[in-house]
Every structure is written in structure tokens, then in C-alpha cells.
Image (cartoon, grey):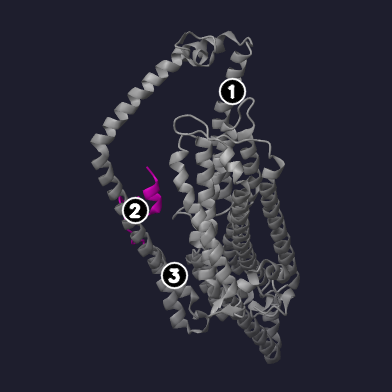
Amino acid sequence: MDSKHEKQYIFNMKLAKIMGLYQILTPDSISIFGYNIYHIVIVFFGAFMFVISMLFPIGLLYLRNDMIALMYYMGCISNFILSSYKMGNILYYSKDIWRCIDVTNFYFISYKHYDRNLFKNWQTRSIRITYIYIVIALFAFFCWIFSPCVMNKSIITIRNIDGSYTSHETYNMHFYIFYIIEIIVSVCYVYFTIIFDVLMLLICFAISYQLETISSTIKSLGYNLSIQDSIGAYLCGTSNSIQLKEKCDIIYNDLITIITDHQHVIKKLNDFYNMFRLVTLIQIFIASSSHVFIWSIGAMSIDEGDNADSILSFKLFIVLPLINFQLFMTCSLFGTINEKKDSIIFALYSSNWTDMDLKSKTIILFGLTMNNANQLKMKFTNTKIVNLEMFSHVSIKIRTNTMRFCYSIFSMLVVFANIKNNIIMDSNTLTFLRLTGLYQILDPNTAKMYGCNIYHIRQMKHHKTVIRKLKEYYTIFRPVTIIQIFIASSSHIIIWFVVAMATKKDSIIFALYSSNWTEMDIKCKKLILLAMEMNNANHLKMKFTSTKIVNKEMFTQP
């Protein structure tokens, strides 16, 4: 990647230098003792954020009586550790990523007749979406950081295990120390997240552009020939026949060049998947979990006369657009790559192959068969592909379950407010509430014993009985449970190895396509084609039954 030719790349080179992305990846950066100085600084702050994240679990046992604080800190732990892992992944693969970024160059592919306007459209789209994402991330960061200064009169209460509330005086005494630590961790989190996501965006945009360019070029291939040319060459003699042969040779050479360019792009795509697959799948999982945590905290924070938890909800809802954008762009871009990759098959068929010579028809036939066998996709499981459909499925499921949960919370709050304010309710509703006991639990005029609601005492007695039974259950079933956990862990490890073997077995198809088959003779081409068809038909897999394959999806299903 040459920084002197900025307009040849699909992303904004100046922005990459301002962010430090260019300096992190380039091998020409300033080094100390042979190590990139930017890597040293990032490792230091990444380790600092990782240590802070590891301190959070200490408070989880202390906060287990406060579900809102528990979900909040679990969300923070998962996102902070993920951001550190993202940056560590970039540093570990920095040399490989530097070579992979060559795909963002307009001159990465050797065919000289590609459409320059298509490159400019993708370049504009890439730069705009990158700026939008950075603005959303910085807006969330500044709102999060300045919210304690704006809402400094609000007090967030945290319940202890015994039901008492923690005093806020100790925290306020050391407020500036905690505030500085929070700023440093937030800066590291936002910076690490932006660097990784921007890098993933620009590579995905570049690969999508290259695949679309190749497909659009193949579609128009051969249309300078026509049946009239063949008839004219047959009727008019040798000179026209030579011209026709020259045209066919030019088309054949162009076809070989374009297919070779496609192979190079697919190799970059395979390298990109190998480096980013695990991080991307973890990000999808944690972003979906954070989505659920935020809506659950928002639902449970609604309490009359207490705005402390609603302040926490305000901070979390500011982060929600950033999480949604991450989830949407990840699924959308990988779905686009899958569509552009599969479009090469239709593009080969759409070319004017009927008027080409036998050599070109043979190459197109090989290209159709090999691309149909090469199923290189980003998958969450063996059957679930990362695409826009997956995002909509996750979003609808989260929204449905969360809204159902919110509705139950809101309904109970409305009933409590009606009882407290002596509002007359519908007779059917009142009868139902009395039968379920909810009315007596919430009604302040219910009979009391020793100053406590009698229904509350019954619930406490029931709670003590349940705890005693639970203790007996733990005593009896603890050894069996430990053995069961050990067996489940062993099963997961075995399944992971089986899936790894199946993945390596299927990679032979991609390896055959990646070979320089375009320059081989017809015997080698037929042999490669036959090997791809046989490997595609050979479904040798570890199966639990005739239909259930041993894979990660089988482990996650009940």
C-alpha cells in the first residue's frame, strides 16, 4: 500500500493516518527495540483495560442482589474484553492485514478495462459510511463521558446482599479518581472498536467492489462478436477468418485474465475470513447480548419517583445506536460479499458465450462448475450464514422477547399505581388480581402482622423453605452435576475437533479452485473439475443419526 497515491484506494488515506490505522499496520513505522511504537502503546492500554475488566467480576457476587447492576457490569465486561481482543487480533495479524489491504487498490487486478466510475461510487460509499460510523461512536462516547457532569445531582443506589443500600459518600470522596479511570477505559474501548470496525468495513467494501467489477465485466464479454461475423468469415474467405480468430483469441485472453483476477480476490477473501472470522462471530454474539441487556435494564429501571436507574438507562440507550450499527453493518457487508461472489456464476452465463470459440466455452464451463462448488462464506454455524437476513431475524427475536418482557413489567407498574392511587379498575381485572394474590401483595391496606403485609410474610416463609430444599438438592446432586459439567465440556472439545476436521476436508475444493488451472492443458483442467465434483459429492461427515451431523449447532441445540 502506497500512501503517495491516495486516490487509488477505496478508503480515505488521510483519515486512516489521523486515526493511526496506517501507522499500526505499516512496517515502516517508528520502532523501539524492533517493535512498532504504536503496538507498544496499544498493548499497554489494552492490558490496562483488560485488568480493569478483570476487576469487575469481584463485584458480581456483591451485586447479585441487584439485577440491574449485575447486567450492566456483565455487559461492560464482555464489551471491554472484546475490544481488547479485537485490537490484539489486529496486532497479531498486522503483517498479513497489510498484505490483504492491497485488495483496496484500484490496480490490484490486472485487467485494464474495468469501469473507473464503479470504483468511485464504491469509494464514495465507503468513505461516507466510515464517517457516519465514527460520528455515531464519538457522539456516544462524549455523551457517556459528560453525563456524570450534567447529572451530578442524581444518586444511583446499589442494593447489598442483605437488602440495604450502599452509601454514596465513599464514591463521591474519590469521584475524580474513578472518573479519570472511566475516561481512560472509555477512550480505549471507543478507539479499539473504531479501529477494528473501520478496518473491517474498508476490506469488506473493497472485496465487494472487486467482485462486482469482475462480474459486470464478464457480463459484457464477447458481445463484440456476432453470428454475422462467423457467417461473414465463412463466406468472404481467409482475411475475415483471421480477423475473427484474432478476436476470439483476444476474448480468450481477456477471459483468462479476468478469471485469474477473480482467483486473486477470492484468495484475499479467504485470508480475510481466516483472520477476522472468530472475532466477527464473537462480536455478533456480544452485540446481540448487549442489545438484550440494554432493553432489559430499561424495562426494569421504570420505577415511580426514582430516576437513578433511568439515568443509567439513558447512558446505555446512547450506546444502543452504535451496537445496532455494528450488528447491521457486519451482517449487511458479509451478505453483500456473498451476493457478489455468487453473482460470478450468473455473469459467466450472461456473457456472449454462444458466439465464442470452443476454448472460451470450455473455460466458461469450468468457471461455472468451479464457482458453483466453491462455497466460501462467513457462517455462524454450518447452516446459518452471516447476512442481512440473520440481522433481521436477530433483531425481530430480540425485539419480540424484550417487548413481551417490557409489557409484563409495565402492566405490573400500572396495576401498582392504580391500587396506590385508589383508581377504580374493571371488575374482571380486579377479580383476576384478587385470585392470583397480586392485589393483596401490592395493596397497602392488606392485613398486617408485626407491621408486615401478611402475604409478604407468607412469601418469606416460602422463600426460606425453597432455600432449605435448594441446599439439600445441592448436597445430593453436586457430585453428579460436576461430572455432568465435565462430560459436557469434553463433548464440546470433541465436537470442536470434529468440526475442524470437516472444515479442513472441505477446504480442498477452494484449494483446487485457487490453483493456476487457467494455464493448464485440457487434461489437467478435466482432472481438477472431476476432483472438485467428487469432493463436493463426498459427504463424509461424523453423523449422530442419518440426518444429524456432529457440529457446533448440534451442541447448542437442546
- Amino acid type, callout 1: Leu
Q: CA distance from mark 3 to mark 1?
A: 59 Å
| 192 on left or right of 538 | right
- The percent coordinates of residue 474 (x first, y second) are 28, 35
Q: Which residues are magenta?
A: 539-558
| 410 on left or right of 514 | right
Q: CA distance from mark 2 to mark 3?
A: 27 Å
**Which of the two discs, 3 and 1, labels the residue nearer the N terminus?**
1
Q: Give residue 232's mark.
A: none
Give the class, few, some or many, for how many residues have Cα within 10 Å of label 3's Cα (few <14, many ≥20): many
Q: Give residue 509's mark.
A: 3
- The percent coordinates of residue 407 (x first, y second) are 58, 28
**Which of the two discs, 2 and 3, labels the residue nearer the N terminus?**
2
| 13 on left or right of 36 | right
Residue ID at (53%, 46%): 75
**Residue 30 counted in the magenta span:** no
Q: In front: 8, or 237?
A: 8
Q: CA distance from mark 2 to mark 1?
A: 43 Å
Kindly identify which residue carries mark 2: 492
Is mark 2 in CB contact (under 8 Å) with mark 1?
no
Kindly identify which residue carries mark 1: 413
- The percent coordinates of residue 517 (x first, y second) are 49, 80
Secondary structure of the residue carrying tag 1 is helix
